[in-house]
Image (cartoon, grey):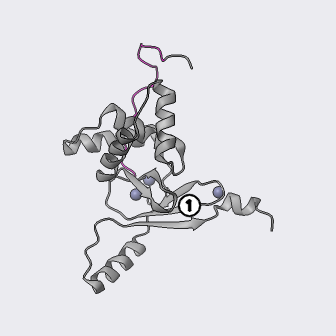
Amino acid sequence: MPRKATQATTEPPARPRPCADPDCRGRHAPRERVALAVSICEGRGERMTAFRRRILELLWESGRPTGAYELIEAVERGESRRVGPPTVYRALEFLMAQGLVSRIESLNAYVPCAHPERDHDCLFFICRGCRASVELEDPRIGGLLAEDAALLGFVATRRTVEVEGMCARCAEAAPA
Ligand SMILES: [Zn+2]
Ligand SMILES: [Zn+2]
Ligand SMILES: [Zn+2]
């Protein structure tokens, strides 16, 4: 792979633009979402290091839940240096603590949160065919979970809902 030129690229830096479309289904330009994440961390006084940022970029570029070992391979390919799993796990822990990334338990993989700029429950639809994931926000789900938690006297800290199945494209391609 050719080394990156040292002079500034012609691409202007991405400007963070908080999402105003409740029906965007999480479709955003990775560069803009990463820029947004950086500005969120700055606002909180949290350090978004180059390495943490790289991990977030890789997750956005992947477009599907990605496992830690895949991330390690991708980082090593790009930087031609060894990266230990603990380094990647620590970066993921930071990104999750900041609400920038969610862990998909059923796949043991990670996805970037589409809307870290606002408080919401992450509702992920994960395709078993192509492994793509789409994040939706449905305030009705959050309302129901809050009601149920109140019944139990349970204090929920973070709610991530995973729905597994087939995306429209894979369902269409599947033999009837
Ligand atoms: Zn959006
Ligand atoms: Zn989310
Ligand atoms: Zn699919």
Query: Residue at image x 53%, y 43%?
Result: 62
Q: Residue at 41% across / 32% down in the picture? A: 83
Residue 55 quadrant: top left
Disc 1: CA contacts within 10 A as few (<14), some (14-19) or many (>=20): many
Instruction: Give amino acid for label 1.
Output: Ile
The picture places residue 116, in percent across and down from the top left corner, at: 35, 52
The image quadrant where one finds ligand 3 is bottom right
Q: Quadrant of the C terminus?
A: bottom right
The location of residue 48, given as percent across then percent down, is 29, 37
* Region of the chain picked out in magenta, as a range: 4-20
- Is residue 52 shown in magenta? no
> Left of 171 or right of it: where is 125?
left
Q: Between residues 46 and 85, which one lies in front from this camera angle? A: 85
Kindly identify which residue carries mark 1.
Answer: 126
Q: Quadrant of the N terminus?
A: top right
108 or 34, which lies in front?
A: 108
Q: Residue furthest left?
A: 45
Q: Is residue 15 visible?
A: no
Residue, far right: 176
Instruction: Give percent across and percent down for residue 119.
Output: 31, 60
Identify the residue at horizontal 51%, vertical 35% (top origin): 73
Residue located 57% across and 66% down the image: 164
Whether residue 150 is situated above or below residue 93 in the rendered picture: below
Label 1 sits on a secondary structure element that is strand
